[in-house]
């Protein structure tokens, strides 16, 4: 299981998000709430003998919900979930997370889908 599969498994355990976690863009016709994740950048570190297996990546989660209060509640659950990733394998069989750090979070309204949108940006260091 890779990082994105582990992330999907973790977020899918949050009430209302089972089957509603997508890479890059949501499935056509999906109803809120749902989450879209995207990779910002990735760095693979090297030791003296080459790649040491550590990946340092930045991800963005876009959360969508039908009301602002529901978005706030969902965002709180997602942030709490992300904070549990440190020093464990995510998704059961996913990669071991050395460190996760939430960098930024904010809310807006997405006129394209007529939904409230929350954005969470985080860095994660994990073993590939």
Image (cartoon, rainbow, N blue to C red):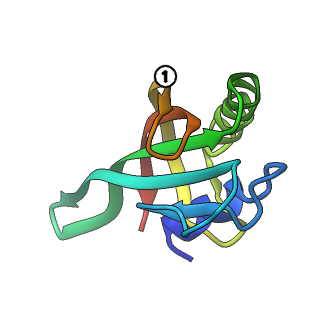
Q: Nearer the viewer, residue 91 or 86?
A: 91
Residue 64: give x, y in percent of width and height.
60, 42
**Local crowd at mark 1 within 10 Å, few (<14), some, or many (≥20)?**
few
**16 on left or right of 19:** right
**70 on left or right of 117:** right
Residue sticking out furthest to the bottom: 1
**Quadrant occupied by the C terminus:** bottom left
Q: Nearer the viewer, residue 73 or 126?
A: 73
Residue found 22% across the figure and 68% down from its top:
51
Q: Which of the 4 image quarters holds residue 1?
A: bottom right
Residue 82: give x, y in percent of width and height.
62, 40
The image shows residue 75, relative to residue 2, as above or below, that is above
Residue found 51% across the figure and 54% down from its top:
36
Q: Is residue 101 visible?
A: no
Residue 108: give x, y in percent of width and height.
49, 25
Q: Which residue corresponds to mark 1?
A: 106
Secondary structure beneath label 1 = strand
Residue 43: give x, y in percent of width and height.
23, 54
Q: Is residue 45 visible?
A: yes
Residue found 35% across the figure and 55% down from its top:
39
Residue found 55% across the figure and 69% down from its top:
27
């Amino acid at each position: 299981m890779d990082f994105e599969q582990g992330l999907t498994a973790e977020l899918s355990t949050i009430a209302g998000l089972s089957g509603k976690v997508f890479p890059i863009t949501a499935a056509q016709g999906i109803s809120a709430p749902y989450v879209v994740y995207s990779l910002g950048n990735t760095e693979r570190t090297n030791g003296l003998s080459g790649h040491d297996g550590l990946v340092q990546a930045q991800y963005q989660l876009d959360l969508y919900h039908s009301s602002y209060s529901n978005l706030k509640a969902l965002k709180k659950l997602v942030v709490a979930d992300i904070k549990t990733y440190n020093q464990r394998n995510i998704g059961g069989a996913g990669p071991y997370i050395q460190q996760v750090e939430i960098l930024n979070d904010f809310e807006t309204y997405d006129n394209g889908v007529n939904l409230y949108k929350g954005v969470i940006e985080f860095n994660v260091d994990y073993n590939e």
